[in-house]
Image (cartoon, rainbow, N blue to C red):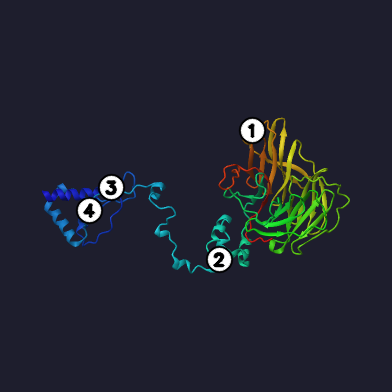
Amino acid sequence: MEGLAMLRQLIGQLQDLLHLYGSPPPPLPPSSPFHLLHLHQLPHPFYDHHRRWCFPNINETSAEDYYSLVMAAGKSGNCKMLEPFKPPPSKRSRKERNRGKLPGSTPASEVMDQEIWKEFPEDLFEAVIARLPIATFFRFRSVCRKWNSLLESQSFSHHCAEIPQANPWFYTITHENMNVGAMYDPSTKKWHHPTISFLPAKMIALPVASVGGLVCFLDIGHRNFYVCNPLTQSFKELPARSVKVWSRVAVGMTLNGNSTDEGYKILWVGCDGEYEVYDSVKNSWSRPGSMPSNIKLPLSLNFRSQAISIDSTLYFMQSDPEGIVSYNMVSGVWKQFIIPAPIHLSDHTLAECEGRIMLVGLLTKNAATCVCIWELQKMTLLWKEVDRMPNIWCLEFYGKHVRMSCLGNKGLFMLSLRSRQMNRLVTYNVMSREWMKVPGCVLPRGRKRQWIACGTAFHPCLTATA
């Protein structure tokens, strides 16, 4: 009877396990002692597709028969001692799984096998690194001298040129420290604070234009031009201008080809119609001609609006008459377009997105103020409103004297909105029509929020050289 009780307990444990896991048993050979057990399918309340084991009623058979059966199975090795029942492991949270791990520790299974990675093709290293986020690349430069020298590699430059341009970054100057730049990366929503080491001490230079990853600076006295790649600090001071014009000028940049390797051009134009073009290939300024007589002088240039470049043509905004003045860097032809501005408009600036000419400005009526976006209709030369800031955001401007400046006008716009009571930075994506708030600009190891004075958008390019 004691053996029968043990046998019943054994079969009960088997039934409990099979009821819990519901997995079908492996097929047994005819020589197995357990082939005598009767197998058939029973409907399961939850899992009809699972097979279940059915054991014969032990009460209907003598204990000796089953005892001999179990003993025979034990001798043949087909029946093993059952371990005490253990519940299935419960799912733990990530916090519990990481508890006890050292910061920065890596599981042994995630360690890169040197025997595999040492055979990684050299030409693929550059292709992979060229696709890293910009901020990550600068951390990778410290790995070894070879990776640090990638910026001078022609093949690496070719890989970078094959990657589609991402959203532009923004290079800005703050009121608190005019000699220190602040770069904003919209993909990570982080500010970077590069040191402008190339500028003379105590000189204030403002970013006025950009193209191909390069930013053009003009000193506050309107005398000297500088070109720099803010990411790599590649720097050049341009030769002195042949025309001595110290009044305020508007500036624009274009590429000679698809990248800075083929050179770039810079145009400055003054209100009296004087202008010059700098060619980086020749490293000199030239005056291709004079302003045509059909363009009214003096030019009432809107210096709050940066120039935009579409292909090889630069567009400048003017206020009297209202409209746009353009200059083609290849043909050397000036044109003027009379385009009336929308009513109740202020602080407006030109912008562009994929060849379309846009307008960004403040629309104020009574005490309500809103940021609006327009697109120029080429057939009618009229501005058509295409979007405006959400009303819930505009409520913050109600009854306040708000001023706006556009710090970037290349597909992704950065707008600085300020009054005595507020200082806001927002971005607007023309393609997705998405408005985003920009985190405050705070210097490293500082707490005070910086006020942005001016800035420009530039497409980050690791291989652009001045």
Q: Nearer the viewer, residue 82 or 70?
A: 82
Q: CA distance from mark 2 to mark 3?
A: 63 Å
Q: Amino acid at mark 2?
A: Arg
Q: Which residue is mark 3?
A: 19
User: Can you name the residue that lies furthest to the right here?
Assistant: 293
Q: Which residue is mark 4?
A: 82
Residue 360 versus residue 230 in the image, above or below: above
Q: Residues within 10 Å of mark 4 (few under 14, many from 20)?
A: few
Residue 395 bears which disc, if any?
Answer: 1
N-term-proximal mark, 4 vs 2: 4
Q: Quadrant of residue 287?
A: bottom right
- Find residue 80 and report its horizontal and vertical position in percent: 21, 57
Residue drawn at x 83%, y 47% as measured from the top left: 299
Residue 145 bears which disc, if any?
Answer: 2
Regarding residue 9, the answer to whether it shows in the image is yes
Q: Nearer the viewer, residue 92 or 74?
A: 92
